[in-house]
Image (spheres, coloured by chain):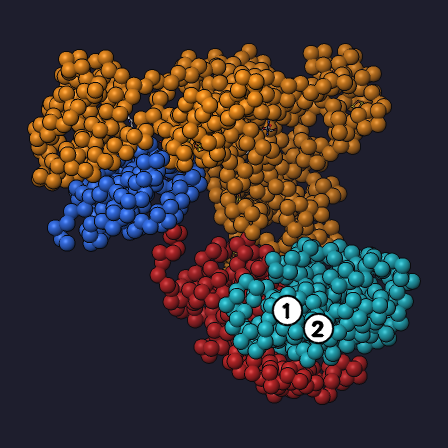
Amino acid sequence: MARIGVFVCHCGENISATVDCGKVAETIGNLKHVAYSTEYKYMCSDPGQTLIKDAIKEHNLTGVVVSACSPRMHEPTFRKACAEGGLNPFLCEMANLREHCSWVHEKNELTTEKAIDIVRTQVEKVKLNSALQPIKVPVTKTAMVIGGGIAGIQSALDIANTGHKVIMIERSPSIGGHMSQLSETFPTLDCSQCILTPRMVEVAQHPNITLYTYAEVESVEGFIGNFKVKVRKKAKSLDEKACTGCGLCTTKCPQKKIPNEFEQGMGMRPAIYVPFPQAVPNRPVIDRENCTYYIKGKCKICEIVCPTKAIRFDQPDEILELEIGAIVVATGFDIKHADFFPEYGHGRYKDIIDGLQFERLASASGPTAGVIKRPSDGEIPKNIVFIACAGSRDPAKGIAYCSKICCMYTAKHAMLYKHKVHEGKAHVFYMDIRSGGKNYDEFVRRAIEEDHVNYIRGRVSTVFERDGKLIVKGVDTLLGAQQVEIVADMVVLATAGVASSGAEDLAQKLHVSYDSHKFFAEAHPKLKPVETNTAGIFLAGACQNPKDIPDAVSQASGAAVKVAALFSQSELTREPLVAIVNRTSPPTYSTCVGCFMCQSVCPYQAIEREEFKARDGKVVKTVAKINEGLCQGCGTCVALCRSKSIDLLGYSNTQVYAEVVALLNEY
Amino acid sequence: MSHSEHHTERNTLAGSVEKSVEVQAHKCYQCGKCTAGCPVADEMDLPPSMVMRLLQTEEPANDERILRSHAIWLCVTCEMCLSRCPMEIDIPSMMDYLRQRARKEKKVNKKAKNIIAFHKSFLNSIRFTGRLYELGLILDYKRQSLNMTQDISLAPKMISRGKLHLFPTMIKGTAHIARIFKKTRT
Amino acid sequence: MKFGIYPGCSLTGSARDYNESVFAIAEAFGLEFTQIPDWNCCGATAAHNLNKELSLALPARILALAEKNGLEEIIVPCAACYSRLVVTQHELKKDPELKNRICEVIEMDYRGTSVILNVIEWIDKYIIPKLEEKIVKPFNHKVACYYGCLLVRPDKILNYDRAEDPQTLDIVMSKIGAAPVDYPFKTECCGAGLSISRTDIVSKLSGKIIEDAEHRGAEAIIVACPMCHSNLDMRRPDINKYWKAKYKIPVIFVTQAIGLAIGLPAEKVGLKRHFVEVKIS
Amino acid sequence: MSDFEPKIVAFVCNWCTYAGADLTGTSRIKYASNVKIIRFPCTGRIDFMLLLKAFSNGADGIIVSGCHPNDCHYTSGNFHAKRRWIMFKELMDFMGIDMSRITFSWVSAAEGARWAEVVNTTVTRIRELGPYVSYKELVNKSVEEEVKNG
Ligand SMILES: Cc1cc2nc3c(=O)[nH]c(=O)nc-3n(C[C@H](O)[C@H](O)[C@H](O)COP(=O)(O)OP(=O)(O)OC[C@H]3O[C@@H](n4cnc5c(N)ncnc54)[C@H](O)[C@@H]3O)c2cc1C
Ligand SMILES: Cc1cc2nc3c(=O)[nH]c(=O)nc-3n(C[C@H](O)[C@H](O)[C@H](O)COP(=O)(O)OP(=O)(O)OC[C@H]3O[C@@H](n4cnc5c(N)ncnc54)[C@H](O)[C@@H]3O)c2cc1C
Ligand code: SF4
Ligand code: SF4
Ligand code: SF4
Ligand code: SF4
Ligand code: SF4
Ligand code: SF4
Ligand code: SF4
Ligand code: SF4
């Protein structure tokens, strides 16, 4: 038999000025099951709370309705008070008499009537409330960072510095990401390698960080605080402990004609290689697809020359099974290559290059030692054209978004070119210059004002080759749409930044959302930019959308703080307002018919399959089961289930039906 | 509901272009790529991207400028602009519409006289015979354009190579063709 | 195999050479055509410049006649006519209401079922498979393949291989022994329908196309459109006058080149009708 | 009909519209007192049977309001929210519910004034429509059975 206590608050005069609180308390007091009803000036004050605690004991209350302000304001206060009074906190509800009644209506009969209805509704609801226990989940205090670009590096170091363990997974042989390929960086023009390399070394040497390169995530199961991750460590064909990194093998390998990825195809590398001189770890791997031994069965020169006998031709891939508490995704981005542009020659012309290729040409450690030479004949271009928005902001090519970084790096490229080739002419075709950011526009202005880069507002229609020159046909829209034809020696396309290859696949393994361009989706575009909609998985860097280094690093630190906050708890406590699928005795087990429609709508992948087996081990029924750790209590599954097998604690079917009935019917 | 649906029907050239050929002038972001690749842009008083910009203003005076322009008649419908426009704006269809509109409102640019004369002669030629009668076309065009000396040397050479018929070919369905012209109010 | 053919006006007049070569190679490969009975002009540029409905009705009549006569596959050698027919088919398919209106205008049923082939598609489908064995005199010349506008655009409707750098014509030419040059003017416009009313513009545009082909060492420009041909060939004196040049490069229809390669005499494929003398064979 | 005071139930989500209605209060914007709110975690929880239940218990009108599609607390995209909305409308139509009795709206936590506006326009509209009796009878006969039988 329910015994409900009702406490009507005046809120000074905030409520009582328009609502007749005395009448409310009195009317409610007459309802069946209401064991105690009273009014008070300030319920949230200490004496107010004491009133509740005492009443619970005195009247043996089984439920409490505080009729005061919005539950969004004081629900925690009164639930806590109830708990202190010896009542399960989830047996307390609030009726919102202030925001939803006294403050929005005139003083009259109707307003008091409405107040009574609001309280009655909560009384009917609370009668059906059940005592709930907060859900506790343990937390494995090891983070995994996927991707070792600058964002991953920053996140890993920040987490490791809070004293927690970090496992970093990088799929290429070295960490560093795109930043390691850059020459100098806007807006300060400091050398990319110089600021990045120390960080890379720090990762390798940090006692809290375990680095796995040449490794990829195979599968992810579990939930926040309790992920189980399988990682495939691809065989490097090398005993990393034995190898000293002397490099002899790489110089002796006869297979030397493999396009060098790090140099964006503008140089060659051997089959056993270290991607670049500052690589971390600085140990070679054998690229089995291109190694003569793996293709033809003979060679093994590297093994012969290796002074420490570190080569292991028969090394298998290794699968690691890891227990992880939180995951930071930092897999970065890629850019479209020049062959994406039919109207600009489909990658047929060697001297039409993309931005990363230009970075390599401008880099002191690049294939030309920092001298800007055009790929076809090594000549220094005297006339160079940069084309911004190449593929970006181009719905016809399937990319409607702005890639954000290219305006800045194009200005940088033009500037670097002018610094190196003083007599040269640099032209930039652009649509808008997007240079919001600290010292960014000043940077672009410098390119124009000091280095006299010729910015032309308009797109280029076509580029073709004639007599070893590139004919660029564009337009200057600021001259009344006048056609412009430039005979150039080299053309650099600021090609669109796109999701890194395999991003979609990884997102599916992680059960996190991604957008139509396969960039990872944040949980909220403004207020949860580093969270995903899966608890415990965070984003850092350009895997979310193209961004520059300062943005990638800020977000990486943000993600690290989220991980640290999670790891500051030994257990996670969650409100138990989650869905449950009913269970009945065998042979029905549940009214669930196993249609799993619910599974398809759950935004959090919280619905699992549970199998019931007969004695002989045969599966007799498969029904839905909610993973409490994952369920966020949205209730979508409840609304959807046709067999009414799921219910939402705190908002159960019987509760909300009771509310509807109470609201609409006379008493 | 998208915001654009809230707008009231527009009584502007951009509005009618959108209605009749589904070209949304406001999608154009003035990149100029159409003009950059247009083979006749340098002859035009209003290059295609400028036409788009003028449409966007929805100013009667600018609508007038478009309809009275020479450019809409110089466009050769090569479709280069459409095939390269990042926003997939169908300028050629729009040009067709603008030409028809300019004629209807009697705003045809004087310099386009010959171009229209040619198109008219062309249609006249098929209106009566069903097929193109090249000699007839040229004679008719010369009559309309008063451009008597042009191409004088061409005809004899064509005739000598068997490329110019001296008499028209009449198809059987000439009455049918005439009705088609009539029904389409040509 | 019986095809319909829609020659279009120019093939019976100014492009007789083209017509002769199409029929000559068809004969050599044992292919027969039936002309669409009582066909009319497609309306060309003039119709869609001046009257949209007319520009759809004229091609619709042609297609309806083909259907009525059971011609399921029709080849259209003229790229301009081809474009008008395909665009009409597309527009009427897209908009049933418009289709009804046009049917009313042409007083005929129209279903839109015909398969319309341009000359290259036709060559690809029926000539290429039997081509190799028939070649007696490989066309060993450097050529610039000029596609023009109407064969490739609107690319969304025509579904052409690569609108920016089409290859089909180049492939056909290499099959008969030619060496196509890298030619960025492939799909630039020659001035098309302005031939008579703005000869100056046509001379300018066509001149650029010719100049680049000569510059790249091509011995002939290969075309598949009578309009392109007449602008580049018949207009040559105007072009040379405009550019104060002496461009001599001949302009040859792809079908003529195939004819030569399989040993047909120059007269048979209409080469003697050109304005610019064709010295290669 | 002017003295007819309709009964209107509002099903709102906790994160956006409920908070928005709180803001109407803190901003002291006045509106008609006919509408009473029932709080849900998310509009996704709102089962269309609940709407039937409300109508069969005498509601003359219903407001369903939640977060703007992009801002749903529980999903990153507008995907679920939008789909839910569409599904709702279809089911209601199917059940023969007079759709003009239901207001679907998006009110965010920051749109206090908008909430007042949604309430007032709904009340005005339902007042004009008069009491909703036809469906109550129908529902009482047939659908109630189904609801009972689950
Ligand atoms: C041409 C060019 C010039 C630029 N110049 C500048 C500049 O001057 N200043 C500036 O601030 N920014 C510049 N940028 C932007 C800068 O490169 C990025 O901001 C930065 O690289 C983003 O870092 P990231 O770690 O997010 O991604 P990335 O650098 O892309 O790193 C991602 C890492 O994740 C790894 N990875 C990917 N997928 C997986 C997987 N499934 N599993 C494991 N590992 C994976 C990759 O191998 C890579 O190491 C430039 C960009 C370009 C293209
Ligand atoms: C017109 C306008 C429209 C905008 N629209 C958008 C939009 O649509 N979307 C968007 O994402 N962003 C928008 N923004 C940007 C957005 O307002 C800012 O990004 C955001 O407010 C920054 O938050 P903040 O906390 O850094 O700074 P603030 O919002 O400025 O907060 C700083 C706080 O610090 C307090 N404070 C200052 N000095 C002291 C001191 N010495 N001691 C103690 N307290 C101090 C201030 O009182 C203030 O409360 C808009 C900005 C403007 C101006
Ligand atoms: S409980 Fe709420 S309504 Fe009551 S006094 Fe406190 S703030 Fe005011
Ligand atoms: S594998 Fe051997 S040779 Fe190669 S770097 Fe290591 S130690 Fe040197
Ligand atoms: S075995 Fe392979 S990696 Fe080793 S030297 Fe030979 S080709 Fe190079
Ligand atoms: S950043 Fe600049 S160049 Fe890059 S897509 Fe945006 S506007 Fe274009
Ligand atoms: S709980 Fe309901 S929706 Fe989910 S599988 Fe079972 S019957 Fe289907
Ligand atoms: S309540 Fe929401 S989060 Fe929980 S299982 Fe159901 S749909 Fe998933
Ligand atoms: S190319 Fe398209 S978007 Fe660009 S100016 Fe022309 S019409 Fe506008
Ligand atoms: S279709 Fe007309 S506007 Fe477009 S590129 Fe060709 S000539 Fe220019």
Q: Tell me what residue is drawn at x 75 percent, y 63 percent.
A: C122
Q: Disc 2 residue type?
A: Tyr
In the rendered structure, the colour chosen for chain B is red
Kindly tell me whether residue A65 is visible in this rendering.
yes
- In the rendered structure, find residue C85 and report the number of the disc placed on it: 1
State the CA–CA distance, disc 1 to disc 2. 10 Å
Kindly tell me whether residue A10 is visible in this rendering.
no
Q: Tell me what residue is drawn at x 46 percent, y 60 percent.
A: B25
Task: State which chain is coloured orange.
Answer: A
- Answer with left or right where residue A585 lies relative to residue A117: right
Closer to the camera in the image, B133 or C101? C101
Instruction: State yes or no: discs 1 and 2 in contact (Cβ < 8 Å).
Output: yes
Instruction: Give the image quarter of residue C273.
Output: bottom right
Closer to the camera in the image, B150 or C79? C79
In the image, is the residue at mark 2 within 8 Å of ligand 10 by its beta carbon?
A: no
Identify the residue at the far right of this view. Answer: C136
Q: Quadrant of the C terminus of chain D?
A: top left
Closer to the camera in the image, D104 or A14? D104
Task: State which chain is coloured blue.
Answer: D
